Image (cartoon, rainbow, N blue to C red):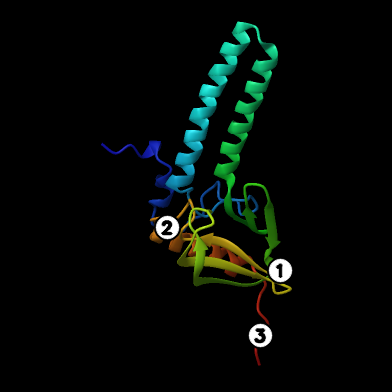
Amino acid sequence: MPLPFLTADRAFDTNDDIALPFDDHDQWRRPYRPGPYRVGTAALALLLASFVLLAAVIIAAAGAVGGAVVTFSVAALMILAALRMLRVGTWVSRAGVRKVGFLRTTTTPWARVTSLRTVQQPVRWLGLPRTVQGQALVLGRQGGEQLLLLTDHNADFLSRVEAFDRAADTVEAWSAEYGPVPAATR
């Protein structure tokens, strides 16, 4: 028995091209779902944070207020790190493209984008120092700078080649829709 009201996929099961009522292009959105490695790591961090919170309650009940405060602080930092880990990725809106990292966020307006292409190059495996040959979506910016938006070996797309292709195509479609109009050649 299918229960479509329980899934987020029902919005994508339609064949018509009518914009959905919540489809606001001014809000930042991730053009793909977070991958299982990213979600699993965040879930494990939240599970560990729950044990640390339980330890903080036990420490507080034992009367060691200073230790309880420190333990609560550690648990709060773990929760914030897990939530930030879920925010990491590439986000798009009408204003531009945003690369959200764990510690740093870079926003590039569509007017500054000069190129957006998928290339074969060495990429980091799950963000670790080890590199493997893979695909990457590279954003060229004015001034010759390049920004690596997506790779097929990061925590969102490892073992999900089709998802990487869809996400890269979606970001390229946003760039084509809101990017600068190329000058007409004569």
**Residue type indicated by callout 2:** Ala
Tell me: 3 left or right of 155.
left
Q: CA distance from mark 2 to mark 3?
A: 34 Å
The residue that disc 1 covers is: 112
**Residue type indicated by callout 1:** Arg
Picture residue at 60% right of the left edge, 37% below the top: 81
Picture residue at 38% right of the left edge, 51% below the top: 13
Secondary structure under badge 3? loop
Mark 2 or 3 closer to N-term?
2
**Residue type indicated by callout 3:** Ala
Image mark for residue 163: 2
Expressed as whole percent of the image width and height from the top left, the position of residue 121 reads 50, 70
Judged by depth in the image, the label closer to the viewer, 3 or 1, is 1
Give the position of the C terminus as an image quadrant. Answer: bottom right
In the figure, residue 114 lies in which quadrant?
bottom right
User: With respect to residue 175, does 19 lie above or below?
Assistant: above
Image mark for residue 184: 3
